[in-house]
Image (cartoon, helix red, strand yellow):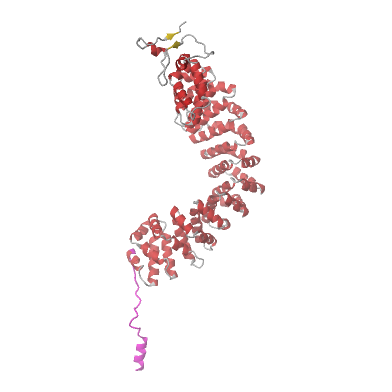
Amino acid sequence: MGKKAKKEAESPPKDVFDPVLIESKTPATAVLMLSSPENEVLAKACDALYKFASKGDDNKLTLLGLGALEHLYKLLSHEDPIVRRNTVMVFGIMASNHDVRKILRELDVTNSLISQLAPEEDVVIHEFATLCLAHMAVEYTTKVKIFEQGGLEPLIRLLGSPDPDVKKNSVECIYHLVQDFQNRAAVRELNVIPPLLGLLESEYPVIQLLALQTLEVISKDRETRIILGENKGLDCLLNILENNELSDLHIETLAVLGNCLEDAHTLQLIQLTGGLKKLLSFLEVSTVPDIQKNAAKAITKAACDAEIRKIFHWEDIEKFLLSLLETNSDGVKVAASQAISAMCENIDSKSVLGLQGIPQLVRLLSSDNEEVKEAAVTALTNLTTASPRNASVVAEAKGIEPLMNTLNARRDGAVANAIAVLTNLSLQEPSRVSIQSHGIMSALAGPLRSTNSQVQSKAAFAVAAFGCDADARTELRNAGGLGPLTALLHAKNEEVRRNACWAVMICAADKRSAVELCRLGASDILEEINLSTKRKNKFSEVALEKLLDNNLPLKYSRMGYLSSSNIITNGFYDCGQTKHGKKFLSLEELSKQELTDRQAIIFINA
């Protein structure tokens, strides 16, 4: 009796199911297991799906097709921490796929993921929730949702996490978010600068790099640059530059410092602490083209401010820029030439750069690289504008011939600036004579036909500048330049039209050119321009007057009178008044017409 009672006591209750070990060999089965009410089954199913998704994009798409995401989404708020952890792991690993992210956006998972960033949550949950958010934050709509759902604050808090993966994912997510200006202002208010600067001391280069890239984006805002200075961020950045072991971070560090240079207040702070000297010393010895190029670009942007140009000049920035023109990298030469253009706004810099830099820039005009050629000739334009001394240096450096060759460049900017430099040089008689001997007027016939308004404007202006010489006017006429010049009178661009009127006024000083211009319709166009209050300019009226004064038959036909200063000479003819809009015929054209009983044509032939 005693043995039987013992046996009954050991028997399990009838309603208890013995554990069954389920082994799934297909993802479809694992997805079905996500509907189980048992926590252990759910946890194991999620773990299996995580391992499966980790093996590649094809597996992620397989799970997507099986509807795994919809089941997993329900488990994000599961009460069991292990189920929740494993679910977040699957989301984190799958979110690297574009199609998966599309479904995640439709499911609106961001709010659930942000709730997983609470301080009391497991570090693995933090890691994979931030990983998923980092992948999703690439798209603009998700950036907005993360901002609206309060995701920035926990992400910034997690920058101080003891786990490097959490730090890396959080800073990467913040980097994507701050591409939007609204988020840049928000992270600044949430005091993101100190933790980001803290990440610069990380032992993991990828974390340091992401922190620098984030700082580079947010330091575009002046308020952030001030906070950066207050938190000794500039010292941190300069320390990275001084550390050769961190050379992989130097380009990104310079990008942040480059933004800081744009602000006069921050730049003065760097200068007062000796940081600017340190920075220039580093740049002068660097031979890395990307560092040199980015430094020159930063100087170009910063030099828009007059106060900053003054500080740069005090620190002898010109010496550094001129050294960059001697490098072997075309990209560096372009960036250096652009920085020289920007620094020309400072009169002292312009003087230094002109004397030492013009011979180097002239040599660059012979470069095979069209971008280098354009940047160099643009710098020469800025150096020679309102600077007779620099214009003389260009001539002394034998710059006229390469400038003439640049008129055939493939880039419109190069052509326009080459014309501008030659025009600047024309103010000095020896240079003007030399340029004319190189056939400037024939060379301008091509640019006058350009469809680029900048080229058209500069070309017409150059015709006005060089057309004061009778031989030059003849050369332009013989080269067929009067036709395209006349066409520019129709230009919608005000500057082009004004310069064309000016050039016509100058060319009209020559009788043969005046007659040819009238034949091409210049007088008709100018009459139309002068009837319009919007289109007429100070040159259009004088140009028409000059044309008519050097083509008296036309003037008499149009006006019905001649002024006391108009002297009739051999070849004058009177064919009667020509109505507006009707073509005025030349003597040759009239002679070919049959005789009629209409008004006789009076011709003076001495």
> Left of 71 or right of it: where is 432?
right
Report the label total: 0
| Above or below, 586 relative to 60 | above
The N terminus lies in which quarter of the figure? bottom left
- The one nearer the camera, 81 or 306, is 306
| Above or below, 76 relative to 17 | above
- The one nearer the camera, 556 or 340, is 556
Residue 397 picture quarter: top right
Residue 141 picture quarter: bottom left
From this viewpoint, is residue 500 visible? yes
Q: Residue at x 46, y 58 (%)?
A: 133
Q: Which residues are magenta?
A: 1-27
- Residue 376 in percent (x, y) is at 54, 34
- Residue 597 in percent (x, y) is at 35, 9
User: Which residue ends up furthest to the top in the rendered image?
Assistant: 606
> Left of 78 or right of it: where is 194?
right
- Residue 47 in percent (x, y) is at 40, 66
Q: Residue at x 49, y 36 (%)?
A: 371
- Residue 343 in percent (x, y) is at 59, 38
- The one nearer the camera, 151 or 398, is 151
The answer to whether residue 24 is magenta is yes
The answer to whether residue 158 is magenta is no
From this viewpoint, is residue 513 visible? no
| Above or below, 524 relative to 257 | above
Secondary structure character of the magenta stretch overall: loop
